[in-house]
Amino acid sequence: MKDFLISIIFCTIGAAIAAFALECFLVPNKIIDGGIVGISIMSSFVTKINLGTLLVIFNLPFFFMAYNEYGKKFIFNAIYSVGFLALSVNLISNHIKPITDDLLLSALFGGGILGVGVGLVLKNGACLDGTEILAMKVAKKYPYSVGEIIMFINVFIFASAGFLFGWEQAMYSTLTYLVAYRAIDAVVQGFNEEKSIRIITDKGYELGEAIIKNLDKTVTYLEAQGGYSKTSKTMVYCVIPRIDLNKLKAVVSNVDKDAFISIENVHEVYGTRYKK
């Protein structure tokens, strides 16, 4: 119940932030986002139907489509988030004036704020847009990835915005989408990227002890075999903060200059030893 209440609180905050971005930056300047939000904005402009109402109507079929795969909790959180988004859009449009009429500022700040709101909702087990659900359904039947299908949908949406609002608005809408995308990543994955390190060396245990001593980070040893040499080697695995990366490279170089190092980004790390 505690986790459920926390997720609802953050979904509420996220939906309110997204509504603020829409009504104070994007909609007044005829700038749209991708997916159902973009379709709803254009449909509202053409039909004069309330934007909040359209957001609910267009999203609900996709949420119910995902019931068997995502379960009751996701559906409830998603419907609640979209419902609160719709309510917030209506309240903000009636009580708060647009912040700016500068298209570039609207695209940058509107996209960034929208991404923060959407990211909070995604991180807490819900979503504000049914496009990805549709894309996943289509991807199961056709040889295209979810990302490719979403890209195709958004190309169509932004092209439609070009005919409806003008091509300048369509280009700013594309910029908004890109900014929102990066903001969503920042919220969902976090800013503090860690580094996942794999080191293949003939001096595995010696290197591992050096890392523990100099960086105070635990390591894991994995047995490996060279593809060309067919000799046994040791793989040393560890996760370190980005700030320690150069120090790690120096430690590896001091122990084994011929070691092979693979470095990858890690967005989240759990574990008592690592936190310590």
Image (spheres, rainbow, N blue to C red):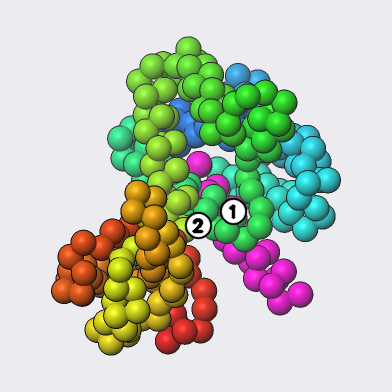
Quadrant of the image occupied by residue 264 = bottom left
At label 1, which amino acid type do we have?
Answer: Leu
Q: Give me the residue at 65% from left, 71% from top.
A: 6
Residue furthest front in the image: 230
Task: Say which of 201 and 82 sits in front.
Answer: 201
Task: Say which of 151 and 128 sits in front.
Answer: 151
- Magenta span includes 2: yes
Residue 146: x, y in percent? 59, 34
Residue 10: x, y in percent? 60, 64
> In the image, is residue 244 above or below residue 139?
below
Q: Give me the residue at 39% from left, 50% from top.
A: 227
**Which quadrant is home to the C terminus?**
bottom left
Quadrant of the image occupied by residue 66 = top right
Number of marks in the image? 2
The residues tagged by marks 2 and 1 sit, at their Cα atoms, a distance apart of 7 Å
- Magenta span includes 141: no
Residue 210: x, y in percent? 27, 82
> In the image, is residue 93 above or below residue 195?
above
Label 2 environment density (alpha carbons within 10 Å; few <14, some 14–19, many ≥20): many
Name the residue carrying label 1: 122
The dot on residue 15 is: none
Task: Say which of 42 and 210 sits in front.
Answer: 210
Residue 67: x, y in percent? 81, 45
**Which quadrant is home to the N terminus?**
bottom right
Which is more N-terminal, label 1 or label 2?
1
Region rendered in magenta: 1-23
Q: Tell whether label 1 touches label 2 (CB within 8 Å).
A: yes
Name the residue carrying label 2: 188
